[in-house]
Image (cartoon, helix red, strand yellow):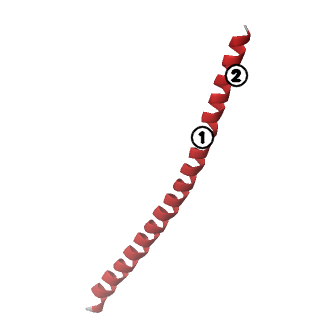
């Protein structure tokens, strides 16, 4: 019966390793996804900044016609 606590601790350690491994995988996956999303948002920000500049130029041209 001495092996029973040892087996329980071994099983608990195995479960802990599996859970920690899964958590590490999830964190890495989400980090990569967020980095990709950040790149996409940065591109969108650049495009919107360009569009804002174009709209500002158009507004100046229109106000110059009046």
Disc on the earlier residue, 2 or 1: 1
How far from the left and from the top, in percent, is residue 27? 46, 62
- Picture layout, residue 14 above or below residue 43: below
Picture quadrant where residue 16 is located? bottom left
Q: Callout 2: 10 Å neighbours few (<14), some, many (20+)?
A: few
Q: Secondary structure at mark 1?
A: helix
**Total numbered badges shown on the rendered structure:** 2
Q: Nearer the viewer, residue 34 or 19?
A: 34
Q: Residue furthest top?
A: 66
Q: Callout 1: 10 Å neighbours few (<14), some, many (20+)?
A: few
Q: Residue at x 39, y 76 (%)?
A: 17
Q: Residue furthest right?
A: 65
Q: Nearer the viewer, residue 16 or 1?
A: 16
Q: Residue at x 66, y 32 (%)?
A: 51
* Residue 19 visible to the viewer: yes
Q: Say the numbered circle drawn on residue 24.
A: none
Q: Residue at x 62, y 42 (%)?
A: 44
Q: Which residue is mark 2?
A: 58
Q: Which residue is mark 1?
A: 46
- Picture layout, residue 48 above or below residue 59: below
Q: Nearer the viewer, residue 21 or 40?
A: 40
Q: Residue at x 66, y 17 (%)?
A: 60
Picture quadrant where residue 41 is located? top right
Q: Quadrant of the N terminus?
A: bottom left
Q: Quadrant of the C terminus?
A: top right
């Amino acid at each position: 019966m001495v092996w029973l606590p040892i087996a329980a601790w071994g099983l608990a350690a195995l479960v802990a390793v599996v859970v920690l491994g899964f958590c590490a995988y999830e964190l890495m996956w989400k980090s990569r996804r967020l980095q990709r999303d950040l790149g996409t948002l940065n591109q969108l920000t650049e495009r919107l900044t360009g569009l804002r500049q174009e709209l500002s130029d158009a507004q100046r041209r229109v106000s110059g016609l009046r």
